Image: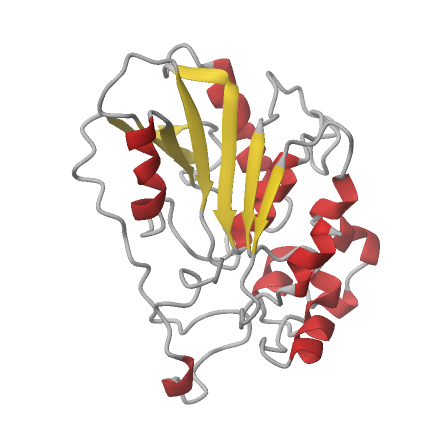
Amino acid sequence: MEEKNNTETLDYDKLDGSLKFGGPPEDMQVKMADISWVKRKKLDIAYAADSPNQVLDLYYPQEGDGPFAVLLHLHGGGFGLGDKRDDHMDTYLKFLSKGIAVGSIEYRLSGEAIFPAAVLDCREAVRFLRRNAAEFNLDPDHFGTIGGSAGGNLSAILGMNIPNGKFPGEENLTLDGSCSVNVAVDQFGPIDFAVMDDMARENGVSFVDHDQPESAESSYMGGPLPTLDPDYLAQANPITYINPDMAPLLVQHGCIDRLVPYQQSVLLVD
């Protein structure tokens, strides 16, 4: 799969240097999906109370009584921008015609809270929906996640089915319910932040900017990547958590990706 959706709003040849390290121009507008046609939906459901951004949307098939399997979208945007209703949802909402409910999770972005906040939010959103599956007419035995770019990283981590209390930031928390999923899709997600620039140099296509202090990954992790403890960086790497209980994982990546070197996905699959 080519990473068209991750780059279609930018014409890199016409930016004249305005592309800052780690992301798009400051005046970039996120394109939004058309959700007006979905008759059955619940919007801006709070799944936690630490931030107004800890909310999710649910969209239901036009027909059927449920309970419905659900595919949960985790938006991209370099961990620092994006929206749960961005235009990627125009594609994912097609699952409604297959009898599958679709959800989309908003999480705290790096400008509000650095790693591991985004992962903790997504894990809590899954717990919330599992605890309240009957209320929201969802089938707790059929939960899936999908995300592109930053959302791909988050989806892959969720797909590892890391037990409660075993992810950084959860050590002393009392957590109610499972955050496991039954399947996960990672679309062109960054995996091992420490080697992204080396891979970009190797492929000759991707931008060599991930180690910069202003990069998306540096902003997410709270400092320039080369200055951070490798063990800390490994905590954001899905490979760290691979285990026999992980969900089936589909990985998709285009080989001319200019933002996330395609070798990141090869590394994960290998």
Which residue is nearer to you in this view: 16 or 173?
16
Image-quadrant location for residue 219 = bottom right
The answer to whether 42 is drawn above or below residue 137 in the figure is: below
Q: Is residue 125 visible?
A: no
Q: Residue at x 38, y 13 (%)?
A: 67
Q: Left or right of 24: which side holds 178?
A: right
* Place of residue 156 in the rendered image (x, y in percent of width and height, measured from the top left): 62, 43
Residue at 41%, 54% (x, y): give it.
Answer: 82
When the figure is inspected, residue 211 is found, relative to residue 178, above or below; the finding is below
The x and y percentages for residue 89 are: 34, 45
Total numbered badges shown on the rendered structure: 0
Q: Position of residue 100 (x, y in %)?
A: 37, 27
Position in image of residue 48 (x %, y %): 48, 28
Residue at 55 percent of width and 29 percent of height: 124
Residue 184 image-quadrant placement: top right
Residue placed at 60% from the left, 51% from the top?
A: 114
